Image (spheres, helix red, strand yellow):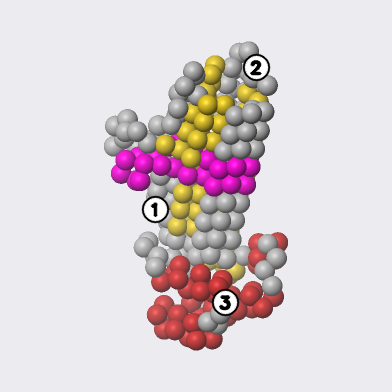
Amino acid sequence: MIHPTAIISPGARIGADVEIGPYSVIGERVSIGNGTRIGPHVVIEGPTTIGAGNTLFQFCSIGAIPQDLKFNMEDTELIIGDGNTFREFVTINRGTAGGGGKTVIGSNCLLMAYTHVAHDCLVGNGVIMANNATLAGHIRIDDHAIVGGISGIHQFVHIGSYAMIGGLSGVSKDVPPFTLAVGQRASLHGLNLTGLKRHGFPATTVSELKSAYKLLFRSNLTTDEAARQIEASAPGCPEVRMLVDFVKHSERGVSRE
């Protein structure tokens, strides 16, 4: 299961049924979970923990030091969950001392070719990043969000659950959950209706999200005024509450229409 040309550090921990392809390099303080498949010419540097059932295609660079001039070889780490797929030339850097010390990728994500995840990013479960999508440092992407191809996300931006960023977008402000953001300045274009349908959200939930969206982004109400109306009209809908809480607590300010 391990090709004879692969270089495995004595300090690495390799689980059961792990495949490691030709000319791959596994460094010190790397842990690889059961059933993970690593293609040829992959470089994994530690401290990095990779869970079970992941697939890493050729030429990935995983766990390298951050591209941050303030980094001074602090003992930081990269943590990756289970069942992820990392396509060709994916690059993921570990964290910095000033950003919490860790970069985290959840489970069941798909990172397509040439995607980049910088230091201290927190990526949730089921996230999809299309080809050439790039994350700067300290970004948070919540579960089941999608980042379109050739898109760039600014440092410290927060992308909400089930949000979608269209291709060729530049995102400098937070993108609320369940919404669709597109363009050079990533303005909102309504709800991510296709994503909501694919994930099986009931029609009543989608209807309540539509009403909340209109009050937040298409009315003349302030955020607080809209939030009060929404909370009064749909107090029992957790998705609406998630949308309102995200907008109320955004630190960078949210993208708008």
Residue count near mark 3 (Cα–Cα under 10 Å), binned few <14, some 14–19, many ≥20: some
Q: Mark 3 = which residue?
A: 237
Disc 3 + disc 2, Cβ < 8 Å: no
Residue 232 spot, x, y in % from top left: 50, 86
Q: Mark 1 = which residue?
A: 156
Q: CA distance from mark 1 to mark 3?
A: 28 Å
Q: Residue at x 54, y 36 (%)?
A: 50
The numbered mark at residue 3 is: 2
Q: Which residues are magenta?
A: 80-108
Query: Where 3 sits versus 166, above or below?
Result: above
- In front: 206, or 33? 33
Disc 2 + disc 1, Cβ < 8 Å: no
Residue 233 spot, x, y in % from top left: 54, 86
Q: CA distance from mark 3 to mark 2?
A: 52 Å
Q: Residue at x 30, y 44 (%)?
A: 98
In this rendering, the label closer to the viewer, 2 or 1? 2
Query: Where 244 sits versus 71, above or below?
Result: below
Question: Please, which residue is most extreme toward the top here?
Answer: 4
In this rendering, the label closer to the viewer, 1 or 3? 3
Residue 106 colored magenta? Answer: yes
